Image: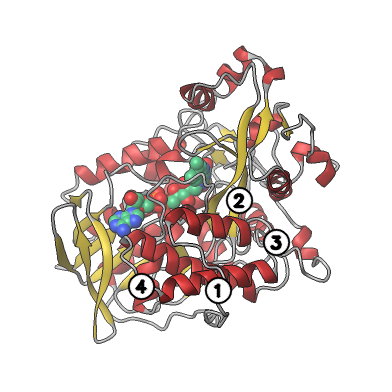
Amino acid sequence: MTDVVVVGSGIAGLTAALHAAERGCRVTVVTKGALPDTNTRWAQGGIAAVTTADDTLESHIADTLTAGVGLNDAEAVRTLVTEGPDRIAELVRRGVCFDRSPDGDFARGLEAAHARPRVLHAGGDATGAAIQTALGAAVRSSGIVLREHTALRELVLERGRVVGIDVETEATAHRLSADAVILATGGAGQLYSHTTNPSSATGDGIAAALRAGAAVADLEFVQFHPTALAAGEPFLVSEAVRGDGAILIDDTGRRFAFDAHPDGELAPRDVVARANARAMAAQDGRPVRLDATALGADRLAQRFPTIDAAVRARGLDWSREPIPVTPAAHYLMGGVVTDLDGRTTIPGLYAVGETARTGVHGANRLASNSLLEGAVFGARAGAAAATDTGWPDVDAPTAIALPDVPAPVEVPVFSRGALQDLLWEHAGLIRDDAGLRRAAGVLAAWADLPRPRSAEDAGLLLLARHVVAAALARTGSVGAHFRSDEVSASPAAAASVPVAQEALAC
Ligand SMILES: Cc1cc2nc3c(=O)[nH]c(=O)nc-3n(C[C@H](O)[C@H](O)[C@H](O)COP(=O)(O)OP(=O)(O)OC[C@H]3O[C@@H](n4cnc5c(N)ncnc54)[C@H](O)[C@@H]3O)c2cc1C
């Protein structure tokens, strides 16, 4: 019997686990926290798929390629979109109650940069939680072994093949052997001092794959959301709040978004995010404020119940006063290079979901395509892990070497916060050669001074070096990667995802 170890319990990992188990594998899911401690459970807006006759696969494919500025892998995009409807049917079978319209069809939201309404949601703005609950229940009743509070530390290789993982719990460290290991450890929002991601998003799987020698790509493409609450635990404030009339102001009360774009707060997402970043830089990093007071308490509570509750839980009354918000790292388009079945460049190792770089997102992710990616490629990887007998060559873009940059004269003391601040400042929304070189120098100096640091911090440091290297290597702006020092903005740089006024675009 094939032994499959899946690392991570979000949509990608749980889908992969279920598909491998249904094909007769002995499956273990290892996850760092409790089962629902994932990015998946926080997804608000929904999952994109073509589910009605008035929509077409070609339209969804075209929207995905446009958002990715054509840097996507066209075959991966076609696979994502074509297999999406089957994965939606599977989620329904597993118990996800997507919201329905009065006629019984799926209620479909129109989101940013989608030509048609095709975003399914559950519980209004609680789609991720509904998916997490259903898949978690399916795994718990399937005979799959679940090891919570167990963290991947290292991939184990023998003769160039992954044969297991080293894991750590609070009490012990031990080794799990496997015929196949599926990395589904999510993204790495914790690289940045502001993020919408929970604390578990430290890029552990990508770092472990890097240490094992797997190819990575597209790490310069980090999507930033314009408005995360800058009070307490990170929380995303949907673009729809601005669509409803909320405005952005700086410390002096000045409305600044029109300096950046004639559409002001309703300009494309990345334009607003950069406008916020510039305004914050001009006020010593203090958050800008989102003024939603004109909407009134009733409207805010009815239209945005989840956000309303989160804002009020932080002791803020946004019907009376502007709330602090910041742009925040939201989604990592790059990751471990895979083929269409999740195979990486190391035999025995698969990667899925936000950890993987399948090529579906290119330079920027289309809203609501990431849950879909987890479902589609999770299923494919689970099936492949169960049936693979050989290991085909997996194509990878040319590797980007870490730059050989001297350390600056003054190197700050390493800490998680110092690393996050460094990346926020120099490898965040607005990048240039000098800043990226400074970041590369500091990161190299930190790496050269081996100090006791947590496994997560060591992984973040390694990943940060590769993010900065990739951002240095791409000298022009494209998609989510903005270089303020390029000679002239390429046409691709202008392509960005516009705000959908009626959508919870996530
Ligand atoms: C606030 C927010 C809103 C979003 N809204 C949407 C949306 O509406 N639509 C959409 O499509 N996408 C949305 N996204 C993005 C989407 O939620 C994620 O990209 C997606 O859920 C990632 O799924 P995943 O299975 O790859 O990873 P995750 O769901 O993040 O799961 C990763 C798992 O790996 C585990 N893990 C991490 N490190 C280790 C380790 N060392 N050892 C063991 N386990 C480990 C974690 O604990 C977790 O269980 C949103 C993201 C956020 C943060």
Marker disc for residue 450: 4
Can residue 16 be seen here? The reply is no
Foreground: disc 2 or disc 4: 4
Q: Residues within 10 Å of mark 3 (few under 14, many from 20)?
A: many
- Is residue 120 depicted above or below 473 in this figure? above
Query: Label 1 belongs to which residue?
Result: 441
Q: CA distance from mark 3 to mark 4?
A: 32 Å
Q: Quadrant of the N terminus?
A: bottom left
- Is residue 151 depicted above or below 208 in this figure? above
Q: What is the three-letter code of the residue carrying label 3?
A: Phe
Look at the numbered disc 4 and give the secondary structure of its residue: loop
Mark closer to the chain start, 2 or 3:
2
Q: What is the three-letter code of the residue carrying label 1?
A: Gly
Ligand 1 closer than 8 Å to label 1 CB? no
Mark closer to the chain start, 1 or 2:
2
Q: Quadrant of residue 283?
A: top right
Mark closer to the chain start, 2 or 4:
2
Q: Residue furthest top?
A: 298
Residue 434 is left or right of residue 307, and the answer is right
Residue 232 x/y as whole percent: 47, 34
Determine the residue positioned at 52% across, 25% down: 311
Q: CA distance from mark 2 to mark 3?
A: 11 Å
Query: Label 2 belongs to which residue?
Result: 224
Q: CA distance from mark 1 to mark 2?
A: 24 Å
Ligand 1 closer than 8 Å to label 3 CB? no
Q: What is the three-letter code of the residue carrying label 4?
A: Pro
Mark closer to the chain start, 1 or 4:
1
Query: Label 3 belongs to which residue?
Result: 482
Residue 155 is left or right of residue 488, and the answer is left
